[in-house]
Image: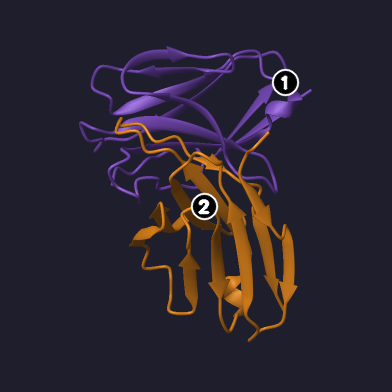
Chain colours: A purple, B orange
Amino acid sequence: LAKTTQPISMDSYEGQEVNITCSHNNIATNDYITWYQQFPSQGPRFIIQGYKTKVTNEVASLFIPADRKSSTLSLPRVSLSDTAVYYCLVGDEGNGQNFVFGPGTRLSVLP
Amino acid sequence: DTGVSQDPRHKITKRGQNVTFRCDPISEHNRLYWYRQTLGQGPEFLTYFQNEAQLEKSRLLSDRFSAERPKGSFSTLEIQRTEQGDSAMYLCASSQRTGDPTDTQYFGPGTRLTVL
């Protein structure tokens, strides 16, 4: 199982772009990279998923370099409601234990 | 919306009692997962089902824990002889195995267990 490393916490201000980088040096060929967001007392919520290069959806972008040993979640123009814990996971669906959550990155958005 | 639902949302019990939690996945999803989450930590995988078959169990799942998914729809997680260390948020997630390498899990709101 690929292990991931993220910063424990980050602070930002409203309106800024936030980039959270995740390291996954032993990512396997079949592994995808998935990011989840979690608010207190709620289950994690899927944000974005990718395999390589760049993926963008309505809430975030995911940048994955060619070697895939890291990835960066980009949140444009954050608001106070983006204050949450963000988890980076790598894995493939063939293994039911593929989702190994680390402690995540606690993002605090300040006014 | 037919998202993942869990019942109850909160459970307070005394040490030594048995508790049972229920999870109703998204209706067309054939995979169902259970996780446990303690304060300040990410969710820890416990077990998962594909349809009614329990395919994997974590070493975290002691003999006091049992999970079922009898008809391949809802699932129950039972903890027998609860201990204070069982206090945690128990999360359920579901996904649809399509044969693609991706497996997006959709999580329920969780059941918070407090063992006194």
Looking at the rendered structure, the secondary structure element under dot 2 is loop
Residue B111 horizontal/vertical position (percent): 66, 58
Q: Which amino acid, by three-letter code, is at mark 1? A: Ser
- Tell me whether the residue at label 1 lies in contact with that at label 2, contact meaning CB atoms closer than 8 angstroms: no
Above or below, A35 relative to B56: above
Question: Which structural element holds mark 1?
Answer: loop
Instruction: Name the subunit of mark 1.
Output: A
Name the disc covering residue B51, or none. none
Q: Residue at x 68, y 32 (%)?
A: A83
Separation of residues labelled 1 and 2 (CA atoms): 38 Å
For the point 73% across and 27% down, the residue is: A81
Q: Residue at x 43, y 75 (%)?
A: B62
In the image, farthest residue toward the front? B71
Total tally of numbered discs in the picture: 2
Question: Which residue bears the numbered disc 1?
Answer: A79
Q: Is residue B55 above or below residue A96?
A: below
Chain at numbered mark 2: B
| Three-letter code for the amino acid on which mark 2 is drawn | Ser
Residue B26 or residue B111, whichever sits in front: B26
Residue B47 location, quadrant:
bottom left
Q: Nearer the viewer, residue B33 or A3?
A: B33
Q: Which residue is mark 2?
A: B73
Image quarter (top left, top right, bottom left or bottom right) of the C terminus of chain A: top right
Lateral position of residue A85 relative to residue A62, left or right: right
Q: Position of residue B66 (x, y in %)?
A: 47, 72
Of badges 1 and 2, nearer the viewer stands 2
Q: Residue furthest left?
A: A29
